[in-house]
Amino acid sequence: MKIFKKKKCKICKVKTGTRFCMRKGFDLCWEDCNILRVDEKCPSECEYHLQSSEIMQQKAKSDSQMEYIDLLKKQMALWVNKPQKIFNDQLPSTMVETENGKKKIVNFINQFKVNPIVPLYYLKERLSLDDLKVNYSPKTYEDHAIELMQNLYTNEWEKVTSFMVNYEYWKSHDLEDKFVTIIAANKVIKKIRDFHLISSALTKEKDQALVYFDVNNKYDVTVNLRLIKQEWKIQSLIIGKPELFNSESEAIQQVAILLSKNETSKAYELLQKYSNIYISSSDFEYYWGLYYTFTKNQKKAENRFLQALILDPAFVEAKYNYAFIQHSNGNIENAKKIYYEILQDAPKEPKTLNNLASILIDDKNYTEAEELLNRCIKDNPEFVIASQNLERLTKLKN
């Protein structure tokens, strides 16, 4: 499918025009929208018009924190050069020529309970208000997403991996390079020359966020972040707009249904399509593994299951399938290690209990093997292979 360049903002002619301006009659970027609307002359019918431009009391729609902060700065720049009733129509920019004037401004601002996102540092620097206390906002989810995009652009892969949710697991299992191989192979990631934050959204619980970027005035990239122990981490990347985030489950289900019907050709087409969108989805890697299993290509199946567990180390079924192939190929120690990992997350997983017990029987570790098989059979009395392994173990012990 051919991807066409997006329409540029009619004012700056550089960034993508993301919203229609009722005042000008054409599309423009949010930066130029801010330049226009700060004068309060935009029609009230426009959803982005300023409802109130009183300093510290601004009411206006913004699609991201970055846009909102930019708008506040522009409002502050106007405020300092306008006569203010609170100061008997004096200009804040001239009041700061005296220490008494500075004190009045500082006292006025201090009466407000200011959200840390408000860029008071801008006023402090602009008016040289040394006594103005500023609470600097911690790094936001947008800051983390921007830093990620910058490091993708510069190919600083070590930094990229350190931002991810599963970084500690990869580090302990020496898998960072394998993750980089997955992400770096994507054609859009390879082509990043410039990027521009368009919008962001935060869940009601404030523990998950989506940050949407325009890339090269041609592609869409959405970064999905999760708040873990009060720190934002990257969960996944989507080559597309934010609304695709909620469509992933439906896309996975489509592929699963086709594979369950053994319609592998149709499943292949959908896997190709969706894998180019959900580039860090463990589910699609898992279904690629099933696809190659059904089409008798064990080597590719093994690689896809490995990629699935890299993208989601807690994905038990993908981990089991990879361990089983390792087991079947005679890579016993690696299979054993992964089986133990699975049981940490899913202590009752029957196939894993049985397979690990089988390895332990061959290792003559009869006590642990018996304990695993008893656990397995207790919850799964119909599991014939586990019962057969227990019989084998009993004979060997006797």
Image (cartoon, grey):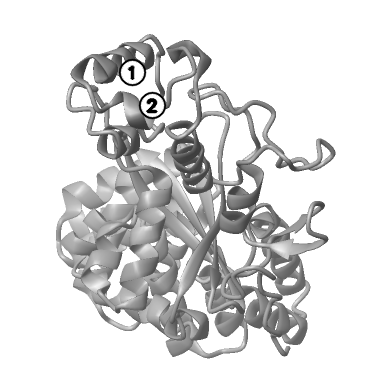
- Placement of the N terminus among the 4 image quadrants: bottom right
**Depicted 354 relative to depicted 219: above or below:** above
Q: Which residue is mark 2?
A: 92
Horizontal and vertical percent for residue 59?
62, 28
Which element type, helix, strand or loop, lies under badge 2? helix
Mark closer to the chain start, 2 or 1: 2
- Nearest the eye: 366 or 25: 25
**Residue 140 at least partly seen:** yes
Packing grade of label 1 (10 A; few <14, some 14-19, many >=20) is some
- Nearest the eye: 102 or 148: 102
Horizontal and vertical percent for residue 363?
16, 65
Q: Amino acid at mark 1?
A: Ile
Tell whether 4 sits left or right of 133. right
- Placement of the C terminus among the 4 image quadrants: bottom left
Which element type, helix, strand or loop, lies under badge 1? helix
At x 35% / y 49%, what residue is drawn? 233
At x 53% / y 79%, what residue is drawn? 216
Tell whether 271 sits left or right of 347. right
What is the quadrant of residue 62 in the picture?
A: top right
Q: Which residue is mark 1?
A: 105
At x 18% / y 69%, what residue is drawn? 174
- Nearest the eye: 77 or 240: 77
- The residues bearing labels 2 and 1 have C-alpha atoms spaced at a distance of 7 Å
Q: Amino acid at mark 2?
A: Pro
